[in-house]
Amino acid sequence: KYNFKVNESIRWIQAKEVLLTSEEYGEDMTTVNTLLNTHLDIVRELETLSEKVDKLEQDAETLSQTHPERADEVNSKYGELKELWEKIKESSGLRTQKLEESFKYHKFLVHYRDLGMEMDRLNTLFDQKKEPRDVAESVVFLDEHDQYMVQMQCWHESFSNLQENGADIAGVHIEESQVKEKVEELEGLWVVVNKTWTNLHSQLIAHKQYQSWSRDYEVVTAWLSSKENIVSESYIGHSLDEVESQLKKLEDFNQSLKAQETKIGALESNGKEMIEAEHFASQEIADRISDTSARVQRMQEKKKERQNTLKDAVQFNHFLLESDELSGWVEEKQNICLEQDYLDFTNLQGKLQKHEVF
């Protein structure tokens, strides 16, 4: 009966030893979990067998005492069992360690792949990003880009955890180089995605600056275009009132131009700052600043020229009015001089007084 129990235990151990020395540790999380569950079942069976081995050890001691003539046989049989028992416990512990390493490694791989895919996805989005067409679109693009950074900050925490966990994986089954290679690959991707984000963020800010500046430029040029006809006007007027009306229009334009000079100055100042910062549109901005300055200068010159012309016209019209008034007066007095009422001797005193007043 003792031999039967020992042989039975030996056969069970030999059967389980095949499973415990298997080189299969799973190729993904699913198979690793399956292998771990199977292994835990064996571990529980080993716990049960442990009690049986202890009992057989007691039986061996008892039989050696009651049957000393067969003590060597009994102890040899138990020694065979004990050797297998120690070996299977070692195999069980080693397989537990390897399966746990495999589980951690495949969990690490899942996170590694997820992070890698997210970084690749973001890099693809960055590569496909279009240039904003106006200020509103620039604001939208920048807001989206800032949201990407929020995602990346979440990834950074996950990436830090992944690095820490990776350092704990390497052991009996998983080589350090396997983990290190994956971590270094992610580190490279992380550097690329951060650099790409930073470059694109700078580009979006530059585009927003350009779009904002261009919007202000269009406002200024539209105003200049709407006022150029005032200084280019050739009509002077056919009367003093008409000339003075044209002059008043020019004076109103001059006041309006002074008000616009603040906007024009800000436009030039902001443009020069962008040029000094080596903005990608520096040449275009410089050309537009030059064009705007030239237009303003031409308007100033034409305004001054027209102002002088209109002032001359005012003086001329005043001269005409005064000439007409003087001509009327001379004509009136000429008639008095040509009167021959002095031939009539009546009321000579009154006629003399009238002539003295003349």
Image (spheres, rainbow, N blue to C red):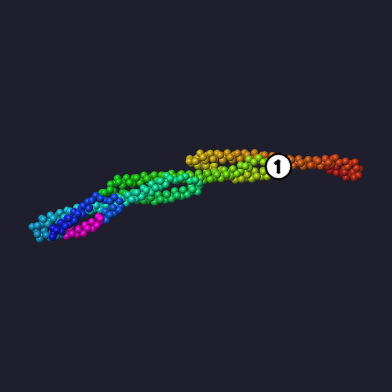
Q: What residue lies at 56% left-to-right and 40% top-to-bottom?
A: 292
Image position of 306 (left or right of 137): right
Quarter of the image for the N terminus: give it.
bottom left
Residue 164 at least partly seen: no
Q: Nearer the viewer, residue 166 or 21?
A: 21
Q: How far across and how far down the image is residue 53, in percent?
A: 17, 58
Magenta stretch in the rendered image? 38-55
Residue lying farthest left? 69
Q: How far across and how far down the image is residue 347, in percent?
A: 90, 45
Q: What residue lies at 31% left-to-right and 49% top-to-bottom?
A: 167
Residue 87 at least partly seen: yes
Mark 1 residue type:
His
Residue lying farthest right? 345
Q: What residue lies at 65% left-to-right and 43% top-to-bottom?
A: 250
Q: How far across and how far down the image is residue 156, in percent?
A: 38, 49
Q: Quadrant of residue 232?
A: top right
Image position of 34 (left or right of 129): left
Residue carrying label 1: 238
Quarter of the image for the C terminus: give it.
top right
Q: What residue lies at 57% left-to-right and 43% top-to-bottom?
A: 221
Does residue 62 belong to the magenta stretch?
Answer: no
